[in-house]
Amino acid sequence: MVFAGIGGFERQINAAFSQFLSKGERQDINLLRRLRKDIKQCYYRYKTTPSEYFLFKFREKSAEERSTYLSDSAIMSIAAKTISRRLHDEELENKYNFYKLNHPFFKRDAILISGEGDKHLFNEFALRKNLIAKPNTGSVGSGIMVFHLQDDVDREEAWKKMMAAEGEWIVEELVVQNKEMAIWNESSVNTIRINSFLHGDKFEILCPFIRTGRKGSFVDNGGQGGLFASIDSLTGNICTVGMDEYQREYEKHPDSGITFPGWQVPYWEDLLKTAEAVHRNMSNHIYVSWDFALTDKGWVLIEGNWGEFVAQQLTNKRGFKADFLKCIYNRQ
């Protein structure tokens, strides 16, 4: 996260206090003063946001332990030294460009809506009835709209909703997940995050994880209330408890009752082969975090980015900075 100025950063601190501190702690002026000072020092030393400070439990950790953690800002900085930021913006952040480059791995169609001039294009595409619209440069599941269109009235209403918001939209056919992944939560498309690194012939992944939404929610992102758990990259078995971004742990999914540790991701070897194939299709990128969903057509690509390592570090209760540096710089 880019430093948002003094006022913006103070607001981030206050928001973190509200989320992570008890009522009694929020009334302790001396505690708040000490925490505020420590949070700012950690930002300058480790590039952690106020939220990451609490998520990584820095209050309980020594300077040496803190230095092992990988912040979102650090990922952006490290990745930008090895991969052009311009290339990231053009081929990863821009969802429609990413779709065009990797269309065979999506196994579904999509269009770009830039403004009123694209209404005819949308109306033709909307004959597919079940669609998802995403801000073309959005993140963490924000701004997403799902449309189930039955007639011209529904199409017109969907169009008005997109035009009421600024910016471009990528509109895709709605992913229908396979029942083997839907058992976690039917209302969300539950995904697998594969963090992969490519150096010539060498392809490797670092601590993949599963994301699943809560009952009634369409998205599975942790930032939108979803749960996550790490996966053993060799076996495809979930190897940790589930967690959310409030640091609550779940042995079982609170809605479906499925136990996290030991659950086997279906068709794991197929997923690894798909991840490697799509990364080799974008071989000018050393590092990408890919999101995949399982459908009756097999594993399909959702998106790619320079993903955060919050889920991995929370569920494994350790920092991943050394692991990340080893992979991205191809160290032995």
Image (cartoon, rainbow, N blue to C red):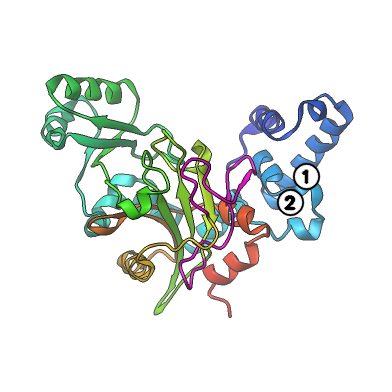
Bounds of the magenta segment: 232-259
Looking at numbered disc 1 in the image, what kind of residue is underneath it?
Answer: Gln
At numbered mark 2, what does the secondary structure look like: helix, strand or loop? Answer: helix
Q: Residues within 10 Å of mark 1 (few under 14, many from 20)?
A: few
Residue matched to label 1 = 41
Numbered circle sitting on residue 45:
2
Q: Residue at x 18, y 25 (%)?
A: 155
Locate the C terminus by quadrant. bottom right
**Viewer-proximal residue among 279 and 225:** 225
Q: Any mark on residue 12, and which?
A: none
Magenta stretch, main secondary structure class: loop
As measured in the structure, the alpha-carbon distance from the residue carrying label 2 to the one carrying label 1 is 6 Å
Q: Classify the position of the N terminus by image quarter.
A: top right
| Residue pictured at 60% horizontal, 68% vertical | 323
On the question of residue 293 being in view, the answer is no
Q: Residue 271's spot in the image, x, y percent? A: 35, 65
Q: Within the magenta stretch, is there residue 236?
A: yes
- Residue occupying image coordinates x 30% and y 32%: 146
Quadrant hosting residue 62:
bottom right
Disc 2 crowd, CA 10 A, few/some/many (<14, 14-19, 20+): few
Q: Position of residue 274 (x, y in %)?
A: 32, 66
Above or below for 16 versus 315: above
Between 211 and 127, the residue placed more toward the observer is 211
Residue 209 colored magenta? no
Q: Outermost residue, right direction? A: 30
Q: Is residue 224 above or below residue 262?
A: above
Residue 103 in the image, given as x and y percentages of width and height: 23, 55
- Kindly tell me whether residue 155 is visible in this rendering: yes
Amino acid under disc 2? Arg
Marks 2 & 1, CB-CB < 8 Å contact: yes
**Above/below status of 147 relative to 244:** above
